[in-house]
Amino acid sequence: MITEDNEGICDISLCDCNVCDHSSNTVFTDEAYKQLIEYLDGIRKTFDIKLSLKGTEFQKAVWNQLCDIPYGETRSYSDIAIAIDNPKASRAVGMACNKNPVMIVVPCHRVIGKNKSLTGYALGIDIKKQLLDLEKE
């Protein structure tokens, strides 16, 4: 399900596409859906969807930093904390990732543990691994 407001996409909830209602499509949602399918098909490496993210200033700083992680690469939670000039905020970075309303587009799946372990993903570690594997191909 893709949700928008008058400024852009504000939420992407992954669901079984056989039961999702796509009847209220708009320019924003149609483009977001198209780009997500292209990403999952291995065609698209970056997104240029207009977003309207709601969150704290800290969350928005984290989400913006996540968008700077290149396709096929990962960063640790502490890397993100350092990048936003808050080096002791690794756990808070993890919480901001957990609150990411537009997973995949804002690539929280590219954030891993400092020891390279796959930790903490709202859709589960298996999905996180699948997304990272997709980006390795």
Image (spheres, rainbow, N blue to C red):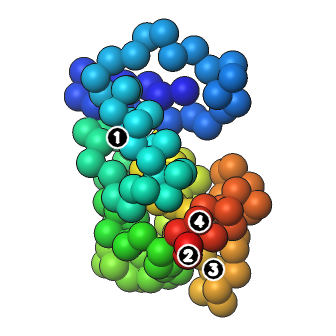
Instruction: Please give the residue where the numbered disc 2 appears in the rendered image.
Output: 136
Outermost residue to the bottom: 115
Which residue is painted at 50% across and 36% down in the image? 12
Q: CA distance from mark 2 to mark 4?
A: 5 Å
Q: CA distance from mark 4 to mark 1?
A: 26 Å
Q: Which mark is residue 53?
A: 1
Q: CA distance from mark 1 to mark 3?
A: 25 Å
Which is more foreground, mark 4 or mark 1?
4
Q: Which mark is residue 113?
A: 3
Which mark is first along the chain, 1 or 4? Answer: 1
Which mark is first along the chain, 2 or 3? Answer: 3
| Camera sees residue 90 | no
Identify the image quadrant of residue 114: bottom right
Q: CA distance from mark 2 to mark 1?
A: 28 Å
Q: Which mark is residue 134?
A: 4
Which residue is painted at 69% across and 23% down in the image? 18
Q: Amino acid at mark 1?
A: Leu
Place of residue 80 in the rendered image (x, y in percent of width and height, measured from the top left): 42, 75
- Judge from the rendering whether residue 87 lies leftward or rightward of residue 77; answer left or right: left
